[in-house]
Image: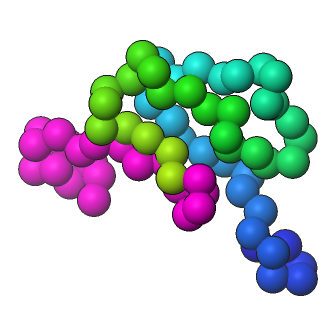
Amino acid sequence: MTYDGQPHDSKVIVPGKTKVDTEQLSHENNLNCLRFNECDSMDYFHPARRHVYLRINEEEHKAQLKE
């Protein structure tokens, strides 16, 4: 968050095969430039929430690597 309570993303974890649409790339934290076409079909970006969702496999869950 910024000093006046506005959201401010600084780091985003994305799947390994994520691509970037350079025509939509900006310095305004616009995450709509992310392309997941070559990633697992369960990985995606939710534009309204501004969250990237990554699938958690059974091994990662059992090892408590991700929640």
How many numbered markers are drawn? 0
Task: Give the x, y percent position of residue 59.
Answer: 12, 39
Residue found at x 52% / y 24%: 18
Asked if residue 50 is positioned above or below residue 40 in the image, the reply reads: below
Q: Is residue 45 visible?
A: yes
Residue found at x 51% / y 45%: 45
Using the image as rendered, state which of residue 33 and residue 16 is in the foreground. Answer: 33
Using the image as rendered, state which of residue 59 and residue 6 is in the foreground. Answer: 6
Bounds of the magenta segment: 47-67
Task: Give the x, y percent position of residue 20.
Answer: 66, 23
Asked if residue 27 is positioned above or below residue 1 in the image, the reply reads: above
- Magenta segment: does it hold 54? yes
Task: Give the x, y percent position of residue 5.
Answer: 81, 82
Identify the image quadrant of residue 67.
Answer: bottom left
Q: Quadrant of the N terminus?
A: bottom right
Position of 23 with respect to 52 (left or right) is right
Q: Is residue 16 visible?
A: no
